[in-house]
Amino acid sequence: MELAILAKCLLLGLVILWIQIHGNKGCFETERLALLDFKEFVGSNGLDVDYLLSSWVDNSMSDCCKWERVMCNSTTGHVTELSLNNTRQYDIERISFYDDKNIWFVKFSMFQQLKELRSLNLSYNRIGGFIDDTNFETLSELKKLEVLDLSTNYFNNSILSPLSNLTSLKTLILSDNIMEGSFPSKELISDLKNLESLDVSLNRFHSTLPFQGKL
Ligand SMILES: *[C@@H]1O[C@H](CO)[C@@H](O)[C@H](O)[C@H]1NC(C)=O
Ligand SMILES: *[C@@H]1O[C@H](CO)[C@@H](O)[C@H](O)[C@H]1NC(C)=O
Ligand SMILES: *[C@@H]1O[C@H](CO)[C@@H](O)[C@H](O)[C@H]1NC(C)=O
Ligand SMILES: *[C@@H]1O[C@H](CO)[C@@H](O)[C@H](O)[C@H]1NC(C)=O
Ligand SMILES: *[C@@H]1O[C@H](CO)[C@@H](O)[C@H](O)[C@H]1NC(C)=O
């Protein structure tokens, strides 16, 4: 009799333990789908995504926290870091990188489900702009974003005003793009109150100083 009760308690305990271990294991479905949106976008540009993002499989049992280029907080299971740099995996030293004239226009709202995202690297992707860059609301959803690397793309000045909505940014890297005019843009700097480091080198700004370093 007592043994039966003990066995039941033990079983219940095991079930609770199992739920605790598995409950926040694996990524969130909304985040997994957001990442698959990006994969689909890359594929729609004619790239072999089953090679380039081979671990990103469309299967609800697949834990996106284990995918290449993705890092999650191990406690919360939310995606916190995305290294989507050089998605085409070119040897960036080679001429083939500069020969590819396929410029991407990315929908930034793809990332809006990743509410815990802290770091996003989109460098070396030949991105010409965010097609929804007038949608300020989308950008301000990323309340935790601290590091954004957009270097070595084809961003022009139209990116600057929407970026000012990413108020949690501490590090912003915009080097090697095609921005011009006078910099620093007062608007950007006054809105990004948490900014500690800004790199706008290798653009076409008038400024005589290479504007790079700590603010
Ligand atoms: C993971 O998230 C928890 C809860 O938000 C936070 O306390 C912790 O610092 C995070 N861990 C890392 C490595 O960022
Ligand atoms: C992306 O950048 C990280 C450094 O932040 C580097 O370790 C990694 O090799 C880069 N990935 C590609 C495909 O270039
Ligand atoms: C982003 O990726 C580029 C290219 O791989 C790398 O050089 C750079 O260090 C990365 N940026 C950050 C903030 O890690
Ligand atoms: C910036 O790039 C976008 C996207 O290519 C384009 O629509 C816009 O006209 C450009 N703006 C300037 C000021 O060059
Ligand atoms: C985004 O920034 C624009 C201009 O910089 C500002 O007018 C708007 O109120 C901001 N929106 C949000 C949701 O922060």
Image (cartoon, grey):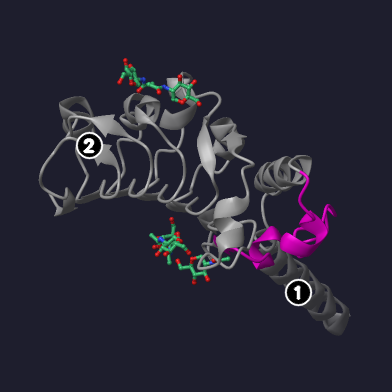
Q: Which residues are magenta?
A: 46-71
User: In this view of the protein, can residue 78 be seen by the observer?
Assistant: no
User: In this view of the protein, can residue 11 be seen by the observer?
Assistant: yes
Label 2 CA crowd tier, 10 Å (few <14, some 14–19, many 20+): some
Q: Secondary structure at mark 2?
A: strand
Residue at point 35%, 32% (across, down): 163
Horizontal side, residue 102 vs residue 198: left or right: right
Circle 2 residue? 205
Q: Is residue 179 magenta?
A: no
| Nearer to the camera, 143 or 192 | 192
Horizontal side, residue 6 vs residue 71: left or right: right
- Image mark for residue 127: none
- Image mark for residue 14: 1
Q: Is residue 60 magenta?
A: yes
Task: Identify residue type, mark 2.
Answer: Phe
Residue at point 48%, 20% (across, down): 135
Please say if the residues under marks 2 and 1 sit with CB atoms less than 8 Å apart.
Answer: no
| Nearer to the camera, 175 or 73 | 175
Query: In terms of secondary structure, what is the magenta stretch mainly?
Result: loop
Task: Identify residue type, mark 1.
Answer: Leu
Residue at point 17%, 30% (across, down): 182
Residue at point 54%, 45% (across, down): 126
Q: Quadrant of the N terminus?
A: bottom right
- x, y percent for residue 52: 72, 61
The vertical placement of 93 against 108, above or below, is: below
The vertical placement of 198 against 189, above or below, is: below
